[in-house]
Image: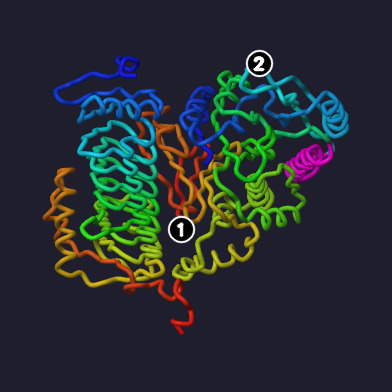
Amino acid sequence: MLQEFKKIIREEEDFVIIDAKGIYYRELNELINELILNGSKKFRILNVNGQRFIADGLRGGYYIEIYGTAGDDLGGFANGPTIVIHGDIQDGAGNTMNEGKIIVHGSGTDIIGHSMRGGKIFVKGEVGYRVGIHMKEYKEQIPVIVVGATAGDFLGEYMAGGRIIILGLEKRPEVEDIVGDWIGTGIHGGAIYIRGVITKDKLGYSANIKEIDENDRKIIEKNVREFCSYFGLDADEILKSKFTKIAPISRNPFAAMYSDSRENK
Amino acid sequence: MCGLGGIFNLTGKGISGRDITIMASMMKDRYDGRGGGFAAYGIYPKYREYYAFHLFFKDEEAKEVTEEFLKDRVAIIKDEEVPMRNIKEIPREQIVWRYFVEVPHKFKSKADYLKREQDYIIDTVFTINDEIDGAFVASSGKNMGVFKAAGMPQDVARLFKIEKYNAYSWITHGRFPTNTPGWWGGAHPFNILDWCVVHNGEISSYGTNRRYLESFGYKCRLLTDTEVVAYLFDLLVRKQKLSIKTAATALTPPFWSQIDRMPEPMKTKLTALRMTYAPAMLNGPFAIIVTNAETMIGLNDRIKLRPLMVGKREDFVYLASEEAAIREVSPELDRLWAPRAGNPVIARLNGDVKEEIIH
């Protein structure tokens, strides 16, 4: 296979450079896997446009730079790699990601961070609907999503754990608020931090506004500083803002729905 | 899943069919080859005053019966086979013929002749689809046509020599049939007069919408949920003269909880619209592109369960299920965005493209 794709691969310092123009996603991903088996650790993939599943299921600290628009489910089930996208991402990036980082210089669309269980996603621009849907956490394994611009409806839908931070640093003209409606519909774990003031009518079922404590402030600061370090932004300025915390209304908001009804009478 | 695409030139400049084919082929993981198609506007300038009928026939007999019927109802100015290539990917299942027709002159004397004429054309289309075995009208608008078959859109493009047409407005669809059969007539776009629709998702309100439309004389015969969208736009915009924005608001209205929070007079207006058009409301997950001769509309369901992106570069507007499909034909864009759920994005000929805020 490497022989077959010789024309589109070259090496530069410790990077393998791949020109992905017109290459079907299956071939591109097989090529990356084969290069990894050959010992490559750092990749720069040029002219990406819509190829799906890039870096899916990679285990280990690989470094992947992508130039272009990464296709659906980028970094799905990834376990360790750092993926930097100079461009946009499509639906489902970071799907069930376990460890690693996805750093996006452009924008993203729907269900980013779907079922994420670890690792971090940083998007400089805006994201779409249902971002962080079904995110979860276990002990120290706490996934984080930080978004520089705005997010659509159903942010953190059915969220069971993890942290989402929306900064709303820029807003396109059609968008009124930095987050859409029904925030945290069905949330039963984790927390969402939104820069500015959010009114209760924006919240979904089982979500509530909670006081920000010292621990929350630490989480916000640590992740905002990391976010700003990737995109050359002033963290101190952003951290001066007030944040609203959205979390489950109670420890177990769905207890009455799923347990024996007689016990709950 | 399905893959949608649209290219619209705001100044009416003709675009070759190559770009729309590239857009379609960029989304090949979204469809499975059981339905692909294109609609093109501005392709028959020589016959622009006549209704262009694109007809599918199962056999010669169906063609003869249909032609007998057509001759009684309309004047056929010209007819010819729609040029096709022989390709191994798509066996010729249908005879595809186009007719440029004119309605009888008696309509011309009436005050609202255009509406009567169009109703007469719709009636002609429904009668063929309903009563003539093995005949099916793929499109019936002026200066436009629908090209579709059971195959991958890029193969359908080769089959119908799509690259040879120049149109100022193109839409495409690659189908992944889930609920209804994959056949030539079931491929998108769906059309009536110059309305066309391509759709990704499901219209779960189909039953309600269909009964509502049937009460106005529309006949749903294509074994698919999508056709109701074309008929709803025809009913609300052409017949009832709602603006496109108001029609789209009736189809994907804000939720009652959102209406409750609105200031007057908006609140009363939207309450009235929702109540009047309750049976026209579209439910279920969808992204659709709807077109007529002057407009291209992109619309998502009210909670956005399907993807849709809009791009603009100078006087070109692009709509697609995936950003990558737009970037492949226009790597540089002045703007690229995902419209909010239920907000129609409307591109108008000799106008601009705008996302209307209704949610």
> Which residue is denoted by mark 2 in the rendering?
B86
* Residue B125 in picture, x, y percent from top left: 77, 38
Disc 1 residue crowd, few under 14, some 14–19, many 20+, Cα 10 Å: some
- Subunit of mark 1? B
Q: Is residue B237 above or below residue B259?
A: above
Of residues A82 and B184, the one drawn nearer to the viewer in this rendering: A82
Is residue A180 visible in the rendered image? The answer is no
Q: Which range of residues does the magenta coloring cover?
A: B107-132
Q: Amino acid at mark 1?
A: His
**Horizontal side, residue A142 vs residue A222: left or right:** right
Q: Residue at x 25, y 38 (%)?
A: A83
Q: Residue at x 36, y 51 (%)?
A: A114
Of residues A196 and B284, the one drawn nearer to the viewer in this rendering: B284
Q: Is residue B113 magenta?
A: yes
Predominant SS along the magenta part: helix
* Residue A208 in picture, x, y percent from top left: 33, 71
**Horizontal side, residue B179 vs residue B338: left or right:** right
Q: Amino acid at mark 2?
A: Asn
* Residue A225 in picture, x, y percent from top left: 14, 52
Q: Earlier in the sequence, mark 1 or mark 2?
A: 2
* Residue A177 in picture, x, y percent from top left: 34, 59
Q: In the structure shown, which secondary structural element does the residue marked by tag 1 occupy?
A: loop
> Which residue is denoted by mark 1 in the rendering?
B359
Q: Residue at x 54, y 48 (%)?
A: B286
Of residues B127 and A105, the one drawn nearer to the viewer in this rendering: A105
Q: Quadrant of residue A222?
A: bottom left
